[in-house]
Image: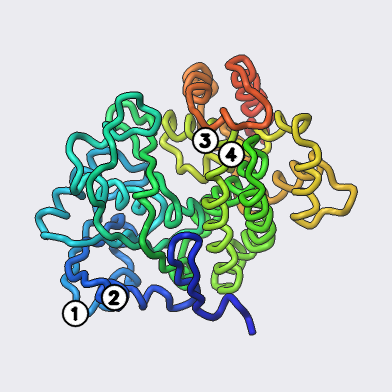
Amino acid sequence: MNEMMTVHTFSFPTLIHFGPGARLRMGEHLKAHGLRRPLVVTDSGVAALPLFAEVLASLGGLEAAPFSGVGGNPVASQVRAGVEAFRAHGADSLIGMGGGAALDVAKAVALMARHPGELFDYEDGRPDARPFDQPVPYWVAVPTTAGTGSEVGRSAVISDDRTRVKKIIFSPQLLARAVFADPEVTVGLPKQVTAATGMDALTHCIEAYLARDYHPICDGIAVEGLRLAARALPRCVETPRDLEARGAMLMASMMGAIAFQKGLGLVHSFAHALSTVADLHHGFANGLMIEHALRFNLEAAPDRFRIMAQTVGLDEDGDGEAFLGWLSDLKRRIGIPRGPAEAGVKPAELDRLTELAFADTCHLNNPRPCTVEDFRRLWGEAFRAAAPRSP
């Protein structure tokens, strides 16, 4: 029996319903917990799909209200609008349905529905941050992409409306109470979205495994997530209706998000800077920089690169260089540009990109310390290596 074609239920620690048709279990789940008035947080793209109407219809007996005011890189004003919608509906729960943006906004709305002050009063690492000391409404997640794994994460990444700088809101209280991970939901994704979100999941697994903190449990999850994603991602892009591959990517996405509680690294610092400066999709930004940033880590973790090379199917002699070559080939196969220049980012932004990447905290768990001069050099190499070819 193909395990991907059956609905499985397990906890890690979130209750997860995984498999085709899992989305249709949500209404009964909420009813069983005495909930009747969910606010369904999504983005305008998902809200326009027949799938969204189907999910709303499956909530028969519940008084659900949609909120579709989420954008690609979510900002604090979207959270404020969501909180207003939650209160106007008299909601008793939330459903987050979408990619990472919608799920992060759902978490932030859940936080601010009953907590005082402004969202960024709760920013992770802020010395005077407000405490998470009020009840958080019950919320469940339906991921529509296989990328961020936000459905099993305990943080929300929300940008400042004015500066576009990403800020992290973190607490175990933000974990969804249940996840309905259904590969049928992801079948209709455009190829470019499948590729970009898939690169996000892949990057999470790789960087979590390389992160210098000690966490063998996360290491094991990261390596298995990498194995699944390496085989499934190109299949999802090239054969979009391959439900087995879609399920494998959805699982790899959740595994990457669970694993990166250990930490991330350089690639994410580069990607966060790119998203701030050029408003690029986060997974796409990860894909642009992944092999350029990871090259910096080769000397610091040769054994781990060798294991990753073997995990993705390279021969026993595969090393870090072979693994980076595999990443470059994968990017070409699924349509991710070689680097920032091919994506239209201007080298004139190098100073700002360097400043933002160095200020980002993700690289603090990188296996090799990276100075501001290192960042500047790596940006330069990425721009030169990926400059558009002459006709």
Q: Assess whether mark 2 and mark 3 are in contact (beta carbons under 8 angstroms).
A: no
Residue 166 horizontal side relative to residue 347, left or right: left
Q: Assess whether mark 1 and mark 4 are in contact (beta carbons under 8 angstroms).
A: no
Alpha carbon distance from label 4 to label 1: 46 Å
Q: Earlier in the sequence, mark 4 or mark 2?
A: 2
Q: Residue at x 59, y 32 (%)?
A: 365
Amino acid at pointer 3: Ala
Q: Assess whether mark 3 and mark 4 are in contact (beta carbons under 8 angstroms).
A: yes
Please determine whether, in this image, residue 243 is positioned above or below residue 364.
Answer: below
Q: Earlier in the sequence, mark 1 or mark 3?
A: 1
Q: Residues within 10 Å of mark 4 (few under 14, many from 20)?
A: many
Amino acid at pointer 4: Leu
Q: Quadrant of the C terminus?
A: top right
Point out the residue furthest to the front here. 133
Q: Which mark is residue 288?
A: 4
Circle 2 sits on which residue? Answer: 27
Alpha carbon distance from label 4 to label 2: 39 Å
Circle 1 sits on which residue? Answer: 61
Q: Nearer the viewer, residue 11 or 277?
A: 11
Q: Nearer the viewer, residue 337 or 33?
A: 33
Residue 192 horizontal side relative to residue 225, left or right: left
Q: Assess whether mark 2 and mark 1 are in contact (beta carbons under 8 angstroms).
A: yes
